[in-house]
Image: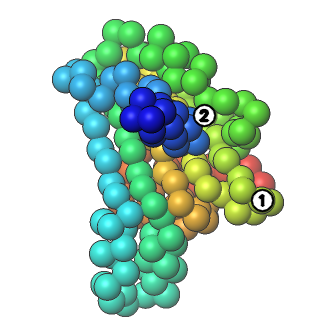
Amino acid sequence: MKNIIITVFTLASFAAQAQGDAISKFFSKYQNDDTFSQVTVSSKMFSLFTNMEMESQEDQEILNAISKLKGLRILAKENARNSRELYKEAMGMIPTKDYEELMSVRDKDQDFKFFIKELSPGKISELVMVMGGNEEFMVMSLFGEIDLKQVSKLGRKMDIEGLQQLEKMKDKKN
């Protein structure tokens, strides 16, 4: 009986991991590698922002969008001789049946690809960005209830490389 309960809990934990974001396996593989920088922001951190008072309407809109986020994970490596290989590896871990390519950008020696996972049309649950350059690599996962317009504004205000690239999506539509 004890073995059956342990087996059920083990299978349940694997199932929960499989339902995680697109780059969980990639993070798991490299999270303890000291050559990578890692950032993890929890939903609690995002919820703390909701207590702030904003002066402008735009800042309030961004704050409202932030309050709906559940987490942010970034894994980056600078001076990486293997950045192109890391880029290909990360791209290979994104399940194309669940994620749709939103946009790709080539900017000098860097390639950016953005993917989204939609729960229903217009309801984005995850935004994944993979960036590879000659000596730089970064993978980012933003999850929760996502408004791309607000994320783009946030990226501009906080000077977050990569999220600023979402502005180009707006420019291409005009």
Q: Is residue 15 above or below residue 132?
A: below
Q: Residue at x 45, y 22 (%)?
A: 133
Instruction: Indicate the position of residue 118 as horizontal and vertical percent values.
Output: 71, 53
Could you say whether the residue bearing mark 1 is in a helix, strand or loop?
strand
Residue 19 in the figure: left or right of residue 3? right
Nearest to the observer: residue 155 or residue 29: 29
The quadrant of the picture occupied by the C terminus is bottom right
Quick check: can you spot residue 129?
Answer: no
User: In this orientation, does residue 47 appear?
Assistant: yes
Task: Using the numbered discs, state the Cα–Cα distance from disc 2 to disc 1 in whole angstroms.
Answer: 21 Å
Residue at 45% x, 35% y is: 1
Numbered circle sitting on residue 113: 2
Residue 120 disc label: 1
Closer to the eye: label 2 or 1: 1
Residue at the farthest left position = 34
Is 114 placed left or right of 32 in the picture?
A: right
Residue 53 image position (x, y, % from top left): 33, 89
Label 2 SS = strand
Amino acid, disc 2: Lys
